[in-house]
C-alpha cells in the first residue's frame, strides 16, 4: 500500500509543480482554512487567550523545537495528563487525563476521530508529531460536543499547511538502539487548491530484548474551493506497524516472549462546507476508518485478529452573528462501529450510536461570555439513552487587564471499554453494564500579563460512576462496576527572561480514589478508598528555550512524578526525567538537530514489570526545497 502511496506522492508533487504557474494566473478562491485558533473546545474558532486554563495549545514552532518523536513524548510534557507505556517505541500506552481511563480521551486529526481499536486505547506511540501546525489538548469532559469516549478530554492534531506556494522537505534521523527515522513532506497552495502530505518510516531495535519496532505511515490533507461558498477538504491517514511484545519482565523466566503485534490502521474522511451567508454555514463530514491488529506467537496461545471498522457522519449548521454577540451550532451525528475477533475464538459485535447536539456561545456584555452545550444520544445496546451537557461562564475582570475567570459544569457519558465486555477468555456482553457517567465541576483563572508572561490555575472535581472492570482470578474472571472520585488542580506559569530566553512551569495535583465497587479489592485498587493505580498524585514540569541567534536554539525539559500505586498496592518509586535538545540552521533550507532523552540515565518503571527507557541520543538533519 505504501509503495503505491509513495509513487502517488511523486506524481502529485511533479503534477502540482507543472500547474503552479497556471494557477497563479487565476483569481484566487481561498480554500477552507483552519485558522491559528483553538477550534476543538467549542467547534468555533476562538483565540487561546479567551479559553480556560484547561485548554493547552502547542504551536508549530514549539513542535519543531521540542523534537518529540511521537504523541506519547509530547503528552508527557503537558499538565494534567500522564501516560503509562507498556514498553518502548510504538508500544501500547495508557492515557490518564485528570485520572480518567484511557478510553475516555478522544484523539482527532483535523477534526476527524482516529480509529482506537478494540480496547478504545489509541496507539499514541504510533502517532507522529511531525508535519503538524499545532496540537490542541482540552482537559475535562467534552462529550456533549464530541460524543463517546471524550469524558476525559480531547486531543486534536492539526496538519501543517501553506498559504501560498510550494515546499518540500526531506529529513533523516539516527539514534540509540538502532533508531532510524525518515520523512518526506510536501505542501502546495495556489488559487483554490491546497495540499499537505507526509510519508514517514521509523524503526528501532528497542531498549528491551525482542522489542524491535517498524512503522510506515502516510498523512494527506487536501482542500479545494469550488467557488466562494462551496469548499471541500479531505483527510487520509494510514500506518502499518510491526512490534515485538516481550511482555511483563517479571514473567520472562528463561527468556522474553516471542509475541509480535502487527497493526494496520487507516482513515478516509471528506467534508463539504457550504457558506449560506456571512453568518450561516452548513458542513457535512463523513469518516470511514479501520483498525486491524494481528497477535502472533502469544505465550498464552491467545493469537488472532482484532478488527474494527467505523462509519460516522456529522451534519452541522452554524450561525455566527456578524456582531460577534452570539454563535449557534446544531448537529446530527451517526456512528456505526463493527468489531470482529477471529483466531482462537470468534465473535462479532456492532455498536450504533445516534446523537443530536448543540452549542451556543453568547457574549452577554463586553466582560461576560456564556457557553451552553447539549447532546442527546441513543444506542442499539441496552445502554440508556439520555441527555448530557455543559455550561461554562467566562468573566473578564474589568479592574485587572488581561485577567479572566471561568466556571464549568458538565455531565457526560461514554460506553464501557469493549475489551472488558468481551474478554479474551469468555464471550460475554453483559446487559448489567450501562454507560460510564461523569459529573464534573471546574473553576479557574488565567492572567495574561503581557510581554510573553501568563499564569493560570484551575481546580476540578470529577465523579465517574459505573466504570466497567474485570480481573482474572484462579476461579475465572470477576466482573464489577466501580465508582471513582477525582479532584485536583493544575497551575502553570509561562514567561521570558529576555527576548531570547523563555520558560514554562506547571504543577498538577490529582487525588483519585475508588468510592465504591461491586467487587472490593480488584483492579482499580486494593480497597474502597484506595488511590487509583498508575496515576501520579504529583507531576511537575519545567521547560526552557534559548534562542542563541536566529539560526540556533537549545532547550531542556524536566518532568518529575510522585505517589503512584501499582496493582499490588505497592507504591512505585518516584522518578524525574530530563531531556535536552538543540537545533542549528546551517542555511535557510538545511538544518541539523540533536537531542538526549533521560540525560541522567535514571532507572524507573512505567508500571510493574515494564521498565522505562535508559539514556538515548538522536541526531538528524532536514532539507527544505
Image: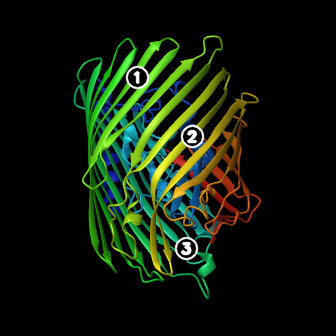
Image quadrant of residue 34? top left
Looking at the image, residue 98 sits to the left or right of residue 340; the answer is right
* Residue 472 percent across, percent down from the top left: 49, 74
Looking at the image, residue 477 sits to the left or right of residue 606; the answer is left
What residue is shown with label 2?
461
Q: Is the C-beta separation of discs 3 and 1 under 8 Å?
A: no
What residue is shown with label 1?
361
Give the class, few, some or many, for how many residues have Cα within 10 Å of label 3's Cα (few <14, many ≥20). Answer: many
The answer for how far apart the CA atoms under marks 1 and 2 are is 24 Å
What residue is shown with label 3?
211
Q: Residue at x 60, y 60 (%)?
A: 533
* Residue 120 percent across, percent down from the top left: 41, 58
Sooner in the amino-acid sequence: mark 1 or mark 2: 1
Sooner in the amino-acid sequence: mark 2 or mark 3: 3
The residue closer to the viewer here, 172 or 435, is: 435
Q: Residue at x 68, y 62 (%)?
A: 616
Query: Which color scheme does this rendered protein use?
Result: rainbow
The residue closer to the viewer here, 260 or 231, is: 260
Image quadrant of residue 22? top left
Disc nearest the viewer among 1 and 2: 2
Task: Classify mark 2: helix, strand or loop.
Answer: strand
The answer for how far apart the CA atoms under marks 3 and 1 are is 49 Å
Sooner in the amino-acid sequence: mark 3 or mark 1: 3
Amino acid at each position: 500500500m505504501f509503495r503505491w502511496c509513495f509513487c502517488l506522492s511523486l506524481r502529485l508533487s511533479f503534477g502540482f509543480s507543472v500547474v503552479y504557474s497556471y494557477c497563479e494566473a487565476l483569481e484566487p478562491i481561498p480554500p477552507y482554512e483552519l485558522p491559528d485558533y483553538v477550534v476543538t473546545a467549542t467547534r468555533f474558532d476562538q483565540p487561546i487567550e479567551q479559553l480556560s486554563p484547561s485548554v493547552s495549545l502547542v504551536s508549530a514552532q514549539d513542535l519543531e523545537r521540542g523534537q518529540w518523536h511521537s504523541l506519547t513524548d509530547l503528552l508527557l510534557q503537558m499538565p494534567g495528563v500522564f501516560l503509562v507505556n507498556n514498553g518502548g517505541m510504538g508500544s501500547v500506552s495508557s492515557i490518564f487525563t485528570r485520572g480518567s481511563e484511557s478510553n475516555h480521551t478522544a484523539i482527532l486529526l483535523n477534526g476527524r476521530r482516529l480509529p482506537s481499536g478494540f480496547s478504545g486505547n489509541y496507539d499514541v506511540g504510533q502517532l507522529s508529531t511531525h508535519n503538524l501546525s499545532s496540537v490542541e489538548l482540552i482537559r475535562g469532559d467534552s462529550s456533549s460536543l464530541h460524543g463517546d469516549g471524550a469524558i476525559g478530554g480531547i486531543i486534536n492534531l492539526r496538519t501543517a499547511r501553506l498559504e501560498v506556494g510550494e515546499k518540500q522537505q526531506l529529513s533523516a534521523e539516527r539514534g540509540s538502539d538502532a533508531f532510524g527515522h525518515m520523512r518526506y513532506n510536501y505542501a502546495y497552495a495556489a488559487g483554490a487548491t491546497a495540499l499537505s502530505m507526509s510519508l514517514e518510516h521509523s524503526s528501532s531495535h528497542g531498549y528491551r530484548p525482542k522489542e524491535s519496532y517498524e512503522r510506515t505511515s502516510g498523512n494527506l490533507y487536501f482542500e479545494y474551493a469550488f467557488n466562494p461558498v462551496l469548499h471541500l477538504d479531505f483527510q487520509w491517514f494510514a500506518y502499518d506497524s510491526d512490534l515485538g511484545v516481550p511482555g511483563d519482565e517479571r514473567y520472562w523466566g528463561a527468556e522474553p516472549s516471542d509475541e509480535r503485534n502487527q497493526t494496520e490502521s487507516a482513515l478516509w474522511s471528506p467534508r463539504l462546507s457550504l457558506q449560506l451567508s456571512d453568518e450561516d454555514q452548513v458542513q457535512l463530514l463523513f469518516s470511514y476508518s479501520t483498525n486491524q491488529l494481528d497477535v502472533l506467537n502469544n505465550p498464552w496461545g491467545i493469537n488472532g485478529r482484532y478488527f474494527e471498522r467505523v462509519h460516522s457522519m456529522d451534519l452541522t449548521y452554524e450561525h455566527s452573528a456578524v456582531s460577534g454577540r452570539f454563535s449557534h451550532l446544531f448537529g446530527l451525528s451517526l456512528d456505526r462501529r463493527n468489531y470482529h475477533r477471529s483466531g482462537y475464538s470468534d465473535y462479532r459485535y456492532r455498536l450504533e450510536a445516534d446523537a443530536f447536539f448543540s452549542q451556543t456561545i453568547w457574549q452577554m456584555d463586553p466582560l461576560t461570555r456564556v457557553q451552553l452545550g447539549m447532546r442527546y444520544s441513543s444506542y442499539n445496546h441496552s445502554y440508556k439513552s439520555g441527555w448530557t451537557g455543559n455550561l461554562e461562564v467566562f468573566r473578564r475582570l474589568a479592574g485587572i487587564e488581561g485577567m479572566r475567570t471561568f466556571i464549568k459544569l458538565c455531565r457526560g457519558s461514554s460506553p464501557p471499554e469493549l475489551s472488558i465486555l468481551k474478554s479474551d477468555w469468555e464471550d460475554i456482553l453483559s446487559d448489567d453494564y450501562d454507560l460510564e457517567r461523569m459529573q464534573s465541576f471546574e473553576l479557574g483563572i488565567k492572567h495574561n500579563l503581557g510581554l510573553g508572561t501568563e499564569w493560570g490555575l484551575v481546580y476540578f472535581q470529577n465523579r465517574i460512576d459505573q466504570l466497567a472492570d474485570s480481573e482474572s482470578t484462579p476461579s475465572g474472571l470477576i466482573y464489577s462496576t466501580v465508582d471513582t472520585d477525582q479532584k485536583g488542580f493544575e497551575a502553570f506559569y509561562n514567561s521570558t527572561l529576555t527576548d531570547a530566553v523563555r520558560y514554562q512551569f506547571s504543577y498538577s495535583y490529582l487525588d483519585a480514589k475508588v468510592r465504591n465497587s461491586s467487587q472490593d479489592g480488584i483492579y482499580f485498587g486494593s480497597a474502597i478508598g484506595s488511590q487509583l493505580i498508575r496515576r501520579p498524585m504529583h507531576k511537575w514540569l519545567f521547560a526552557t528555550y534559548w534562542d542563541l541567534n536566529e539560526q540556533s536554539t537549545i532547550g531542556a525539559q524536566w518532568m518529575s512524578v510522585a505517589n503512584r500505586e501499582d496493582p499490588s498496592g505497592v507504591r512505585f518509586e518516584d522518578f524525574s526525567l530530563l531531556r535536552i535538545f538543540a537545533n542549528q540552521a546551517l542555511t535557510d533550507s538545511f538544518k541539523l538537530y540533536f537531542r538526549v532523552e533521560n540525560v541522567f540515565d535514571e532507572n524507573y518503571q512505567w508500571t510493574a514489570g515494564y521498565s522505562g527507557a535508559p539514556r538515548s541520543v538522536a541526531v538528524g538533519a532536514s532539507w527544505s526545497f
